[in-house]
Amino acid sequence: LIWEAPTKASQAWFVRHFGPEVNLGNIPPDEVIALETLRLGLRADTLKEVLLGDSSVEPAAAS
């Protein structure tokens, strides 16, 4: 199953809800590195959830 996530907000939402191994498609080529940093928890969007394993954080509403 591959989820279409062309925006940074939708990518962050899918990583938060399904984890860093989620399959995402329709990623603009210039955002691939940013997505990988998101998956690794190196972006503010997912830093706390990925590094601390904190599942109590409420995800922000996707725009």
Image: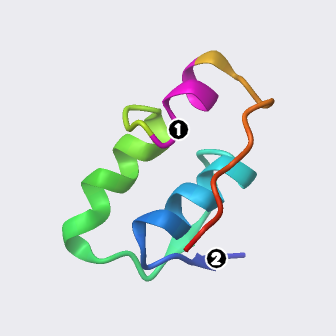
**Which residue is label 2 attached to?**
2
Q: What stretch is highlighted in magenta?
A: 45-51
Q: Position of residue 57 (x, y in %)?
A: 72, 34
Who is closer to the viewer here, 21 or 9?
Answer: 9
Say what secondary structure mark 2 lies in: loop
Q: Which amino acid does label 1 sit on?
A: Thr
In the rendered image, residue 24, in percent from the top left (x then y), is placed at 54, 69
Instruction: State the quadrant of the N terminus.
Output: bottom right
Image height of 27 relative to 23, above or below: below
Of 17 and 63, nearer the camera is: 63
- Of residues 45 and 19, which is closer to you in this image? 45
The furthest residue to the top: 52
Task: Please state if 12 lies on the left or on the right of 30 as rendered.
Answer: right
Task: Please give the name of the residue rendered at 63% of the width and 30% of the height, measured from the top-left corner.
Answer: 49
Q: Which residue is farthest left?
A: 30
Q: Mark 1 points at which residue?
A: 46
User: Magenta includes 50?
Assistant: yes
Give the image quarter of residue 62.
Answer: bottom right
Residue plotted at (60% across, 65% down):
23
Find residue 29 and report its horizontal and vertical position in percent.
23, 73
Q: Quadrant of the C terminus?
A: bottom right
Image position of 51 (left or right of 42): right
Dot 1, crowdedness within 10 Å: few (<14), some or many (≥20)? many
